[in-house]
Image: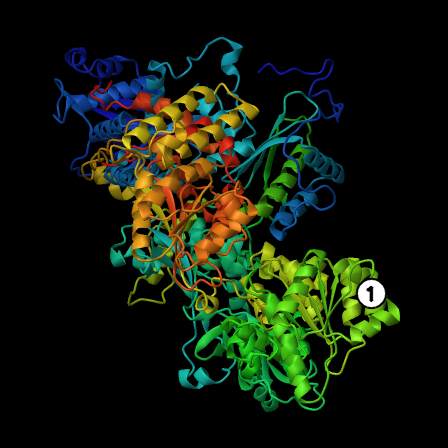
Amino acid sequence: MVTVHGLWSRRQVLCLWTDAPVLPAAREALAARAPALAAALGAPARGVLELLLPTADGVPRHVDGPVDAPVVLAPWRLRVVALNPDRAAAVLAEVTALGPEPEPGPALVLADDLRHLAEVAACVRARVDAAHVVPDLVHDDGAWWGRWAPLPDAAWRAWRSGAAAAMPPVLRAEVTGERAEGERQRGRSAVAVVDELCAELTDLLVARRLREAGLLAEPELGSDAGREPATGGDAVSAWVASLLSGQEVAGAPAVLADLAARARRWRGSGTSSPVELVLRVTEPPDPDDDAAGTTGGPLAPSGWTLQVRLRSLDDPSLVLTPEEVRAGVGGVDWPLEADPWAYALTELARAGAVYPPLLEEIGAQPGADASMGVQALLDLVGRGAPLLSEAGVAVQLPGRWLRPQVGLRLHAHTSAAAQEGTAVPQAADAAGRLGADQLVEYSWKVALGSEELTQAELEAMVAARSPLVRLRGRWVEVDAERVARSLRFLQRAGTGSAGLGGVLGQVATAKDLPAPVTGITATGWLGDLLDGRGEQALEPVPPPAGLRAQLRPYQERGVAWLAFMARHGLGVVLADDMGLGKTVQLLALQLHEQEDAARRGQGVAPTLLVCPMSVVGNWQREAARFAPGLRVHVHHGPERLHGEALAEAVAASDLVLTTYALLARDADDLAPVAWRRVALDEAQHVKNPGTRAARAVRSVAGAPCPPGGTHRVALTGTPVENRLGELHALLDFTSPGLLGSAAGFRERFAVPVERHRDATAGRLLTTLTRPFVLRRVKTDPSVISDLPEKLEMVVRANLTAEQASLYQAVVEEMLAQVDAADGVQRKGLVLATLTRLKQVCNHPAQYLGDGSSLLRRGQHRSGKLALVDDVLDAVVADGERALCFTQYREFGSMLVPHLSARYGAPVPFLHGGVPRAARDAMVSRFSADDGPPVMLLSLKAGGTGLNLTAANHVVHLDRWWNPAVEAQATDRAYRIGQQRQVQVRKLVCVGTVEERIDALMTSKAELADLVVGTGEGWLTELSTDALRELLVLGADAVGD
Amino acid sequence: MGEQRPPGRTPWDGSWPPGERIPADGIRARSRRGAFATTWWGRRFVDAVEQVAGPGRVARGRTYARAGQVLGLAVTAGRVTAQVQGSRPTPYATELGFATWDAETRAELADAVAASPATLAAVLAGQMPEGFEQLTLDAGLALFPESLADARFSCTCPDWGDPCKHAAAVVYLLAEWLDTEPFGVLTLRGVDRDELLAAVAARQRVLDAPSPGAGAAPGAGGSAPDPGGVREVPLADLVATWFTRSGPLPVLAEPALRPSGHTVLDDLDAALLGPGGEGLPDRLRAALAALDRRGGQSGEL
């Protein structure tokens, strides 16, 4: 019986040997089933293998079995048949195919060692069959080579360990000359034997298949090109080239060695860790919660620890030590080759690379707790945590850790005397000087975030000299230096009293505040002012006897506010919406002050009102109408007075009107007057402080002043709060110094708010300015209660079949032409099409222009007109009236007979062709108690200037897509004088361009203002596809 | 190899130095002037070579290192191999060999490091704490070569100096590399990163395991050192079953089928390969597709 052995040698060849010659008959019997093996057994044994074999009595043994003599291991030189990997693969495959029978042929036995190698090879083939292979980069024979290796996934590694453990010991027993005796006795590593065999066979099989598939370049033997190293632009390319050519990898060895190391980690990356490293900071045990909870808290004790743990990715609440992971705590299945502890250490090293103090100072190690000083902790939290998070290392801080901002808060208290002044006294004090100099007491406080510190807490915190303190039961990290400076600031300037302007002015102008101001609060009337409730909280002023007007409630409140501010010498900006009556409020203030002074037998210095030239006449008429008792002098025109004459005229007046242009020119004449008040109308005209007019304004409003000072008023209808530069200019006039210089303001407020959307700066600015600015808009709740509601709605009509077919024809006609048209031509085509479509939507007769009747056999031809009838029927039934706007005169003209017949009264139609006198007649007849229930107006002629509050319904028959124009038209009915709820209906046709543009505008309100708000021109810029989408008739257009 | 020599000059003609160096564009030293390595551990190698090499060779070695004459440098266990462009067209192959630690010594290192894991983490993170050398000295291990006289130099250049300027240039660049890769010092001692980690982890495991004999020095009294965590039984204990398997080969699970067009490389993190790595899976997609035999085709061989 001959036993066939196999061994995978270090030289990467399969060595076959037998304990006796194989007979030719046995070979022939084998040749049919295993030709390669048979051939190998017949080949001359030219190879030499030095092998440790069990030796008894000086004789090597080739099979295991009982033996009497003592057995030792001794090296033997054997003659072997050496097969290169190619032939080895074939032989091993045959061995597998022969099956488990111990005797495949007569007198022939296959040893376990050979079978083991064959079975390993079979597994390698299975891996290649599944394409579970990865590229490797190996250094061999002085060069780098691209090779293929099995994918080292978890299943492979588990199998490999098992294959190594099961291996017959002889496979580890190859002896090579240079090995030391100790090494020789230890033998080769079983894992290394398996790895080498698998790598060699994998690369062989993959290369063979790639060659068969034409993907591997055939080596060109004998040509120089065959010896050239593979080339490529970079190391990876060179590597790929080598994998697909079998040639050496070109490139610098250092680069390739680096790539090989990277490739090793890359190959292992398919098996991901089920855990991640987490650095957990744990706080020291609570000292004593109750004591610390109320006082400033003691010095942060040491005893902070850093725990290096592994956190389950599946269940992040599972935080474990490596030992626990290894033990399978929490059901974590560990698939990696490296031990969990080694994994944790490698990850910790990665963390240490981005944040060295972790290892150097803290001395963190996996699974253990490292204690930290406060400084190390703060550095870890402040500097380390961001770096570590960026590197993907989790840092867990105690849940109650806070890092609040240190801020200053200003508290102002008005004295009791001032609080009495909340109600404007009927008789002012003799001196009349409450003025800007009236003192306000203030105090500064230090706050951490939203929590204000008591003096004791602050002192304790400073005394602790620690950036980490316990405050009210929580760990608080603070800028200790800033806290200390804040305490010094409080000790130096913590409380005081100053004029209101001075107190608030500190906030914006002080350069040496130790921390940013995060809040301003006040008590009493000042608190109301700061909260923006000043106007509401003040007691109303009795209506001046000389006022020939009924003030609306919000106007009364405005006058009370003006009077209050004036009495305290505080300049104001009155920024009510246009139309809310700023003029009448100022006139009422004038009369109030005069009557007040007169009761005390005193006079009041004159007021200078500066306005644009265009409204001088209006002021003059309004003053004459509402306050006929005021003596008004107009300083205007070429005949205007100068010098003495002017001074006398001014002295004999209560109100002097002039323009910005003349003020600049005649400042020398006007400045010497001690004005009671300087009021700027349309004050945005002086928003640029460098202009002559602005300089003149400041000089005229300056000294000399009458007793009680010169009151400064700015009137404007534009929303100043959105234009910070303008706001500063206005307040710089009315409340000099409050907001500091223009440059400082830009730095402190304008840039942070406008550019960085800094909410804190925005809030602070609002708080600072709110006392001095009164702005009501029509939609303010306080104003709405004075004006009736307005209900706006879009009402939809379906098209009739006739309308739909016309509409479709128009769209198709345009689409047929639009691509050929360009420039002006295209623009014209689009606008004309839009007009036609809107005409179709209004009424077929309008589009056709054929004078056909509006109804056909009693049926509506237009869905929209049917809807108009319905709406107006309801209005009339309620005894109310409606305004109907259209932009098409011909449509209005068509409706007049229809509506007149329907409601039994001539319906007026106000349009551009109606003479002035006839218009006035229409308006007054409509306003009369027995006037017609409906009035038609063209958008252009009837959109402005008319007061038609007799109607409380507005119907926009067609749309101009300009919200401002439509709102203006609506305001004919929705204005002062309107007593009822106003209902506004905007009609659109379903599934048409009307509905789509309406949807576009409502969905993108701000865009609509910017783009659509300018009219219909934007439509012409649309692409053909966008146009088609916008215009084409929807399936839902036709009703019924 | 068809090496070309300048006419009339042979490597052994005695006219040293044989000629001007040929400019090359290899590894550029970071150091432009003055000292080379900036870390204490890097300096140790520079100092060692400067002790044994003559001043002329040291100076020329620096010049070579700064001029990019060293074309490639690879550090493997106990060995540094490099190609240095000298005055002949074919670069010289320069090699430095260091005495490596045997398995027993490596086990002693693992013992020492296991007591101070943060130190090992620091080395892996690119910083060798001063304490690390002390730690090895305490364990009776010489981490750094006393002098490069201990190292073996070989170079294909004709200079009889030991070390030659090429070897000196390689040491300078080696020192710079070690500045950022302190673990390289251990690599030169034949210590494998993963092997050491596994060995330290194994010792940690002993420390972690609650055992009545806690406090006993780890590894003490144990049998063979266990560097890889896999027990390798000495061959002498296995003679009785020399040719016999200790058990059946484990079953290698058949991998799950993949969606077509998807390869195993798609599951790996290509970013780990560095520049150019992202495209690798695509470039090898066709090759891997050609391998897949599980679509009904039978195996070969």
Does A891 sit above or below residue A17? below
Residue B72 falls in image quadrant = top right
Does A366 sit above or below residue A463? above
Q: By what rule are the colours in the image chosen?
A: rainbow
The foreground one among A264 and A835 is A835
Percent position of residue A1028, x then y: 40, 28
Say whether residue B106 is visible: yes
Answer left or right for B25 relative to A847.
Answer: right
The foreground one among A436 and A47 is A436
Per the image, the residue denoted by label 1 is: A667
* Tag 1 subunit: A
The amino acid on which the numbered mark 1 sits, given as a three-letter code, is Ala
Density class for disc 1 (Cα within 10 Å; few <14, some 14-19, many ≥20) is some
Percent position of residue A996, x then y: 39, 39
The foreground one among A1020 and A651 is A651
Q: Residue furthest top?
A: A222
Residue at position x 69%, y 44% in the image: B50
Quadrant location of the C terminus of chain A in the rendered image: top left
Secondary structure at numbered mark 1 = helix
Residue at position x 62%, y 66% in the image: A583
Say whether residue A972 is visible: no
Does A206 sit above or below residue A348? above
Quadrant location of the N terminus of chain A in the rendered image: top left
Answer left or right for B7 relative to A1039.
Answer: right
Percent position of residue A253, x then y: 55, 31
Percent position of residue B92, x then y: 63, 26
